[in-house]
Image: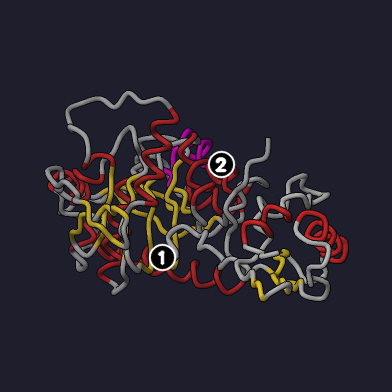
Amino acid sequence: MEYYPNLILDALKHVVHPGKGKDIVSLGMVEDDLRIDGKRISFSLLFDRANDPLIGSLKKACVKAIHSYVDEEADIEGNIYVKVKPKAKPVETKALPSVKNIIAVASGKGGVGKSTITSNLAVALAKAGYTVGLLDADIFGPSVPIMFQTEDARPVLEKIEGKDKIIPVEKYGVKMLSIGYFVNPDDALIWRGSMATNAIRQLINDGNWGELDYLLLDLPPGTSDIHLTLVQTISITGAVVVTTPQNVALADAVKGVSMFKSKNINVPVLGLVENMAWFTPAELPENKYYIFGKDGGKTLAEKLQVPLLGQIPIVQSIREGGDNGEPAALNEASIIGLAFADLAQKVVERVELRNAAMPETKIVEIKK
């Protein structure tokens, strides 16, 4: 009797894996090394591990099947070998593996100048020699394009390793992506929560950020689905919370700090920034007028036991720079330029201390 491969495989289809309820051929357990030499038949069985308890019983079942359905005189005993399936190479699961530090800049409420702080901090870090990215995650009120005067920019797609990647807009040494680059600036964004969170994921995962020392996230005010999406998508190194000295802003800043410190989120809070700490007229640079209260952010930082990273005054050049697309931090010699340079240095120091003392922040897994 002449044997042929399909005859052998048809016989082995009668061998059912007791744990999986399917035959070993359908399960892909018969290795592609079947050999026939006269009456001698040999092949290998694939198992997930070398000490699989079913190895012995399945080998005996294969011998019985071939003797029953092929030829009872077939030389098969001792010719069935065992191979272990090679382990799949681990897939890179960390989003943005080339970004060293991801800093979330948040505020408990709107109107405290969070985007101004984020934009100027990005510029100050870039001027200090770091590679910097800025993701405008404020989907419903994107302001980064205005603050960098890049409203007309339209990021292009580039095919990288077979995937379409979005090339960020770059200005003043800062790589930027914002939903504002993809919509008409005069149109109101009326999106359901799922649409907004999907847009954020796309900007993160499809952006060709390259190697960065710092990626700053300009978050929406308050707490929302966007915040949850971010901590579920990327590993955030730490958070910076922006407030003003007035009581209503301080009360909301407490909520912002509490969100990041909560058990489910557990993102280290690098510190507080007190914006609009005082008003200084350009013609009287030594004068300070505490129009929103004095040292409210400083007092809150002490109460919450988080560092005060900086107190940023109200200076006309900040407003002018934001409107003209020239962040005030560009002028390093000015009062405000020096304030942001100092803030950048404090953030760098806090990040270095955090990385030396704590493990990488884990991506949040929400369990229902």
Of labels 2 and 1, the one closer to you: 1
Q: Return the residue at label 1.
A: 99
Q: Return the residue at label 2.
A: 254
Residue sitting at x 72%, y 64%:
48
Tag 2 secondary structure = helix
**Residue closest to the eye, 365 or 242:** 365
Mark closer to the chain start, 2 or 1: 1
Residue sitting at x 35%, y 67%:
212
**Residue closest to the eye, 33 or 70:** 70
Whether residue 246 is in magenta: the answer is yes
**Residue closest to the eye, 340 or 259:** 259
287 relative to 138 in the view: left or right: left
Tag 1 secondary structure = strand
Name the residue type under label 1.
Val
Q: Is residue 277 visible?
A: no
Q: Residues within 10 Å of mark 1 (few under 14, many from 20)?
A: some
In the rendered image, the vertical position of residue 138 relative to residue 275, given as above or below:
above
91 relative to 341 in the view: left or right: right
In the rendered image, the vertical position of residue 248 relative to residue 343, given as above or below:
above
From which residue to which does the magenta span run?
A: 242-253
- Quarter placement of the N terminus: bottom right
